[in-house]
Image (spheres, rainbow, N blue to C red):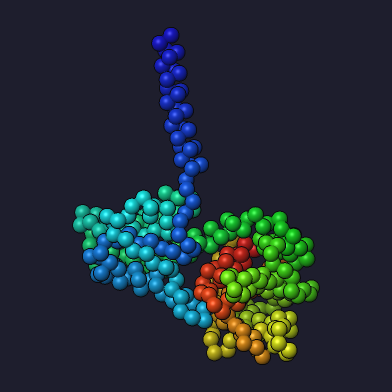
Amino acid sequence: MKILKLSIFFLLVLFTFVSCDDLNERVLPSISGKSGDLLLVVDSNYWNNKTGAELQAIFSKEQVGLPQREALFNLIKVPHRSFARIFHTMRNIIMVNIDPEEKIKIDVRENVWAESQLLITITAPNDKIAAETIQKNGEALLDYFNHQEVKRLQGKYKSNANSKNAKMLEEEFGLKISVDDLYIVAKETNDFIWLRKDKKVGEHEVSQGLLIYTYPYISDSTFEVNSLVKKRNEITKEYVIGGVENSYMQTYQEYIPKEKEINLKGIYVKELRGLWHMEGDFMGGPFISYTMVDEQMNRVITIDGYVYAPKFDKREFIRELEALALTINF
């Protein structure tokens, strides 16, 4: 009888631990803060020294490809003693621990206090070494947080995988992109489609658009910036017509788009961030484009997202299009 009672007791204890673990997974709260917010937990004597200067130099850099200055992240700084529970659910956190007894270490963790949270802890023995560690790993740190913001958006877009627009793109273009049905088709041909989503924020107009076009792949020179811009201008001049007679979209010549090479699920992709304007009209804004080769069909695919939001910052509107474009499968 005692053995039976002990067995039941251990089973109950085991069930309690399993249940608590499951419960913790289920009740992990949602992240707080806006997209692009970054909480820096670092004490003031280091924030006002080399460590703080390096953090600001990296994360306050200007986002390229925007018509006005916008920092890569919105920085919020608190010292360790003020890192209360209210901050624990922040979406992006960098925690700097400086202790003479500790060695250099960078620890990257997700879902610590909130769902989809990214926490990076940087440990160093002094201010100088902390700053050097941050400087050496600056690009990697940026990539971690940028990737996490895009991943969060793509998680939201998963529900659009079976939308009417997504099915239409798959049937007519052989492309899987998680486009929601708030986008309307503004123009379509056999190898081009213009999808746009117009809305009002307060009294002001905001428009986000996707230009998707394909053409035969001939050589690697396709991926040169001049070639990509030339092709973009040909496409937009023919198909992306403005509200004023004889107006059409073009790439802003005085600003050379910034290029970046990325690996998307094993596929080589060229990213461009630049500015557009409406020839013959007073409209303009930023764009981001992704160009890749579909080797099976020997075609080049470009997904180009643009924003028109004259009264607002545009970083997060562009990030939404970036995340959307990178849901592509073909």
Q: Residue at x 42, y 56 (%)?
A: 90
Toward the viewer: 293 or 239?
A: 239
Does residue 267 appear in the picture of this structure?
no
Q: Position of residue 12 (x, y in %)?
A: 45, 24
Q: Quadrant of the C terminus?
A: bottom right
Q: Position of residue 174 (x, y in %)?
A: 74, 64
Position of 273 with respect to 179 (left or right) is left
Q: Position of residue 165 (x, y in %)?
A: 73, 63
Q: Quadrant of the N terminus?
A: top left
Q: Quadrant of residue 95?
A: bottom left
Toward the viewer: 166 or 136?
A: 166
Does residue 46 appear in the picture of this structure?
yes
Toward the viewer: 246 or 52?
A: 246
**Farthest-out residue, left:** 100
Q: Quadrant of residue 207?
A: bottom right
Q: Residue at x 52, y 81 (%)?
A: 67
Q: Position of residue 184 (x, y in %)?
A: 72, 69
Q: Residue at x 57, y 66 (%)?
A: 320
Tag count: 0
Q: Residue at x 43, y 68 (%)?
A: 73
**Farthest-out residue, front:** 203
**Farthest-out residue, top:** 1
Looking at the image, residue 35 lies above or below residue 290:
above
Position of 293 with respect to 261 (left or right) is right
